[in-house]
Amino acid sequence: KEYFQIAGRAGRRGMDKVGYVVSMIHRPTFNYTEIKRLTSKDIEPIKSQFKLSVNTILNLVDQHSDEEIEHILRLSFFSYQKFGKEYASVPTKKLMARYNSVCKKLNKLGFIDGHTLSDKGRFSSKIFADEITMGEIFATDFMRDLSVYQILLILAALAYEPRRMNKFKKTFGNKELTDLVTKIKRHPYLSREKKFENLKLVTVFIKPVYDGKTMFDVLALTNLLEGDLIRVYGQIIDKAGQVKKATGDFTVRDTMKDCEGIVKKALEGVYDFG
């Protein structure tokens, strides 16, 4: 598949009828049969990667009418693969089932009001993962009395993907963690977010760096590889950056800058996220 992704770009679009590809080979290990198999045909089927995410739906609602949305979904490659040549005659109700289901949920949660985005919905239309959870936290009054440490814990919990083989020597409990857990449990939507079950666990990523230590101090507390830990911190920085761009609240932006600064300082001399 990778070969055809590259080779398919040979030739100038709209100008050349044929594009020529020259493949460099290593003669001592050259295997004609394998090269022929690789270059003769593309045997892996193309699959649509289209996902009707919350972000996608919010932007469809914001930028298109109901008729335009149906037209867009009906003509998508995803619909063609799912319904085949009958895609044009699929009943609207069936075609729009997933879309309507998510819209109903978003209306109930206050992200959409009819065919208009609320402030919370507009915020989440600029978030690319955990859209509802991020909106409930950063586009409402939920975060108003939270400390930078507590917000870092939230971002870490949303960023970290637990694996069975991951081990931690210790976690860090304190009143800020307890208060945050209590606040989340009292929220009708956030209390159902499974990722927040790891809030205590992710203190190992946040407490040391919040106290001015480096990622190497964190590595000493876990069996995570350096690259895996950098990935977690990168996700935290990315989520903070998304919030900065999505919000119109300068206080929230300043808080996100503080969060980014703490994490980036812990990675000084190791990795530069810009």
Image (cartoon, rainbow, N blue to C red):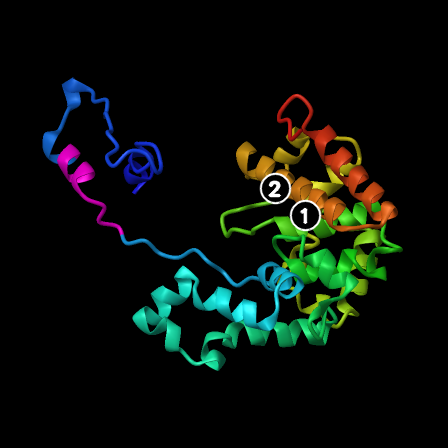
Q: What stretch is highlighted in magenta?
A: 35-44
Residue 136 showing in the rendered view = no
At numbered mark 1, what does the secondary structure look like: helix, strand or loop? helix
Q: Distance between the residues labelled 1 and 2?
A: 7 Å
Residue that numbered label 2 is attached to: 232
Name which residue lies at 15% across and 24% down: 30
Tell me if residue 134 comes above or below residue 221 in the rendering: below
Left or right: 33, with 13 as reference point:
left
At numbered mark 2, what does the secondary structure look like: helix, strand or loop? helix
Tell me if residue 158 comes above or below residue 84 in the rendering: above
Residue in the foreground of this view, choosing between 87 and 50: 87
Residue that numbered label 1 is attached to: 156
**Viewport quadrant of the N terminus:** top left
What kind of residue is marked 1? Ala
Q: Do the residues labelled 1 and 2 touch (CB within 8 Å)?
A: yes
The spot of residue 195 in percent (x, y) is 63, 59
Q: Is most of the magenta stretch helix, strand or loop?
A: helix
Tell me if residue 49 comes above or below residue 66 in the rendering: above
Q: Is residue 4 magenta?
A: no
In this view, the residue farthest toward the front is: 15
The spot of residue 145 in percent (x, y) is 89, 55
Name which residue lies at 66% across and 32% down: 215
10 Å crowding of disc 2: few (<14), some (14-19), many (20+): some
Name which residue lies at 35% across and 56% down: 47
Left or right: 81, with 174 as reference point:
left
**Viewport quadrant of the C terminus:** top right
Residue in the foreground of this view, choosing between 231 and 11: 11
The spot of residue 111 in percent (x, y) is 72, 67
